[in-house]
Amino acid sequence: MRTNLATDALPSLLAKLTIPSLIALLASSLYSITDSIFLGRAVGELALAGLGYASPVQLFLVAFAQMFGAGSASLISRALGKQDEKRAGSAFSAAFIALMLTVCSLALLFFLAPSLLLKGDNPAVKGQALSYLVVLLPFTPFFCASTFFAAILRSEGKAGKALLLLLLGNGVNIVLDALFILKFGWGIKGAALATALGHTGACIYACSLLMNKKLLLRPHKPAFPLLKEIVPLGLPSLVRQLGTTLIIATVNALLIKTAGQAALASYTIINQLTMLAYLPLSALVMGFSPIAGFSYGAGNSRRLASLIKLSLLWQIGIAMVLLGVFQVFTRPVTVLFSSDETLIASTIPLVRIVLATIPLIGIQSLGAAYFQSIGKSLQSLLLWTSRQFLLLLPLLLICSYLFGPKGLWFAFPLSDVLAGVLTLVLLNREKKHDFSFPK
């Protein structure tokens, strides 16, 4: 059924755009979630801590795949819309080559000198992290390319193919995790190899699609001057991912120094649960954005106002359900990642603290997406970066310094409160001065 952004009923339209986004986000997140579950339950606390300690390196590299993917996808979709297939193909080739050169250089640097990012006083945890990275880093071209290819397929409207790519990679990862970890007993090295081969399988599938004549996009001679347009377009994606990477690396360093591997294992579990909690909220934002941009561009203030009210109600409603799940059923969701009763007991109260402000996360992300959709980049950038760079990072350092490891966990909800207040202030200012909302 054809989707009309201008006339379709908002509830059904929002649902139509949100549900596929949720499935795609879940598929892209399953790699780390699956590895965490297998390692936590089959190997133990040390392997879980090692996985969490290694994750910033992988996230850092994937950030560049997201930047080149988002930036080139925007250019490619517009070029294909103008039936300029040569420009689209040249942009694809230039972005892909630039991505490969960037991430392979960085991966080689980390492979030769992993201590650049893996600092700490716990040799056991560091050893586990190094074991993971030694296996994974040689496959850097594949796990970065699979992220890039998914964005490229979406740029041509092949969202189903992009989703299949993600599901295929994750399916391979899950099967190989079971084989390498449970049957062969390879531990964290097995998890790394399963992830690497999952991404490799996804890349093979993507390459087969690119050779299919039914696809409009065909690789052409790279036009590297197009990178001047691609990189700025993808910069917000890079900044957001680097913010996440920096936060995880900072918390890892603070915990390994002051609390040890058990706290780091708890944080690895909390990260996975946080990712799961944010998926529905992020999917709703992805469904909201194209409708908001279209309505604003069409000057339809009444439809835009109705969309904002509806999306806020859905976001708050979903967030309240999630809040109830993670506060009431904390133990069942935590047990998914570990069978160690001591670790579970110490993690449960921390999950409740960190995820206590889920509704505010939903409001903040929706506000940032609104400003991005209507072209107000300054307000959007402020909201996208406020929680991580401007609020959470300083609060982590201050709270851990003043109150130790226990204080660190309260920095998360405190930053959410402050970011939520900032979002409401900017939205209220927008309502009063910059846009006429119907009553």
Image (cartoon, rainbow, N blue to C red):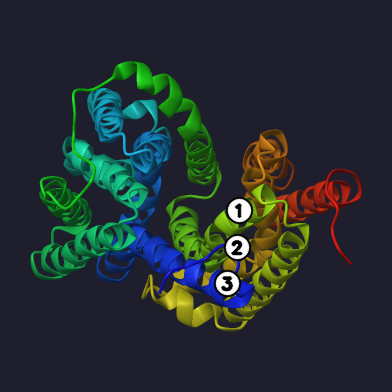
Element type at mark 3: loop
Q: CA distance from mark 1 to mark 3?
A: 12 Å
Tell me what residue is drawn at x 50 percent, y 45 percent.
Answer: 248
Q: Disc 2 to disc 3, how far (Cα)?
A: 6 Å
- Give x and y (percent) for residue 337: 38, 70
Report the side of 60 relative to 140 (left or right): right
**Above or below, comparing residue 15 to residue 292 in the picture:** below
For badge 2, the amino acid type reads: Ala
Q: Is residue 14 left or right of residue 413?
A: left
Report the residue marked by disc 2: 6
Amino acid bearing label 1: Phe
Which element type, helix, strand or loop, lies under badge 2? loop
Is label 1 or label 2 in front? 2
Residue at the spot of label 3: 8
CA–CA distance in space, label 1 to label 2: 7 Å
Q: Nearer the viewer, residue 178 or 25?
A: 25
Q: Quadrant where the N terminus lies? A: bottom left
Local crowd at mark 2 within 10 Å, few (<14), some, or many (≥20)?
some
Mark with earlier residue (1, 2): 2
* Image height of 128 relative to 179, above or below: above
- The amino acid marked with disc number 3 is Asp
Helix, strand or loop at label 1? It is helix
User: For this rendering, which residue is in front, 116 or 429?
Assistant: 429
Q: Are marks 1 and 2 in contact (CB under 8 Å)?
A: yes
